[in-house]
Each structure stands twice: as C-alpha cells, then as structure tokens.
Image: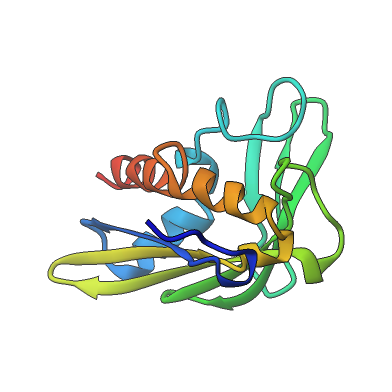
C-alpha cells in the first residue's frame, strides 16, 4: 500500500444512474436539494437545520438554514451550466467549519450525462491538498461510506 502525500491527494469520484433526463436530474439536485440531502446527519449548524439551498447562478451561495433564520455557508457556485454541470467551491475545512478564503476551498464538480433512458450523475470532489495533512482525513471522510456514495444513494432514491 502506498502512502498518500498532501501534494498528491487523489480526487473522490462517485456516480449513480437515475431514471430522469439530464434536465430533471439537474433540477432535482439543485432546486430539489433539500428534498434529498440528509439534513438530519449532514449539517454544520448547532441544533436543527430546516433546509439547504443552492442559489442557481455563478457566485450563488451553497448553505444551510435553521428554523430561527440562522444561516451557515458551505461554499458557493463557481460555474453553473444547466443541465450538464455545476462546479462548487466547498469552503468547509476538515473540521467542518466554514473558511471564508476561497483559495482554501476544495472543489465539488457535478456532471449530468445522458445514459440510456436516464442520466449518469457523477461527483468529483478534489483539491484536498489545500488542507495539507488534514486533507487526507477529509478525503477519506467524503470518500467513505457516509460521504458522497451515501449522499448519491439518497439522491437516487429521491429520483425514483
């Protein structure tokens, strides 16, 4: 087994196929984000989280909101190309805290590609090296069972 150095963190790449056309798959992922994202387990705010939002434009915020109106940013939309692609800046640190410096963000790219009668939805989370040694643990977390594979399984279930 090789040791991964902070300078060579490999991206995390996961895919699912859903029985929706690319436009509907894109819409569910973005406008329907709070319908499938597991807010009970994947949130940063203390206490209850009411919703999670992706603002549909380059520069749009990606954040969660509590019932009392408090908001917590996760990052922002770098590129918005419906119905085929979204590129996010993920500004959460390995400790799951917001870092306002966009130069310290990892990237999450979502691709929506026609496949048969449905759409292959692929996430690539990359750039963990901006966090040095801590980026290795972050990569393992988002690449593990409770990370993107589990999130995409929930997304696929919502699309069914």
The colour mode here is: rainbow
Q: Is residue 61 visible?
A: no
Could you say which is closer to the camera, residue 8 or residue 141?
8
In the image, is 2 to the left or to the right of 18?
right
Measuring 72% from the left and 51% from the top, which residue is drawn there? 92
Could you say which is closer to the camera, residue 110 or residue 101?
101
Measuring 48% from the left and 66% from the top, which residue is drawn there? 11
Give percent across and percent down for residue 44: 71, 35
* Numbered marks: total: 0
Q: Residue 132, located in which quarter of the rendered image? A: bottom right
* Residue 40 vertical position relative to residue 120 in the rendered view, above or below: above
Measuring 55% from the left and 66% from the top, which residue is drawn there? 9
Could you say which is closer to the camera, residue 13 or residue 139?
139
* Residue 70 vertical position relative to residue 155 in the rendered view, above or below: above
Give percent across and percent down for residue 147: 47, 43
In the image, is 122 to the left or to the right of 61?
left
Quadrant (top left/top right/bottom left/bottom right) for the C terminus: top left
Q: Residue 100, located in which quarter of the rendered image? A: bottom right
Give percent across and percent down for residue 133: 68, 55
* Residue 58 vertical position relative to residue 97 in the rendered view, above or below: below
């Amino acid at each position: 087994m090789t040791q991964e150095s902070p300078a060579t963190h490999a991206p995390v790449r996961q895919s699912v196929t859903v029985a929706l056309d690319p436009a509907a798959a894109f819409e569910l992922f973005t406008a329907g984000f709070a319908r499938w994202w597991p807010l009970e387990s994947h949130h940063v705010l203390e206490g209850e989280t009411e919703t999670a939002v992706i603002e549909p434009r380059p520069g749009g915020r990606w954040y969660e909101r509590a019932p009392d109106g408090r908001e917590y940013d996760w990052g922002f939309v770098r590129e918005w190309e419906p119905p085929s692609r979204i590129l996010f800046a993920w500004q959460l640190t390995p400790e799951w805290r917001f870092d306002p410096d966009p130069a310290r963000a990892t990237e999450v790219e979502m691709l929506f590609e026609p496949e048969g009668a449905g759409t292959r939805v692929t996430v690539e989370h990359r750039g963990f090296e901006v966090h040095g040694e801590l980026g290795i643990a972050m990569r393992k977390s988002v690449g593990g069972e409770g990370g993107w594979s589990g999130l995409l399984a929930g997304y696929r279930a919502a699309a069914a």
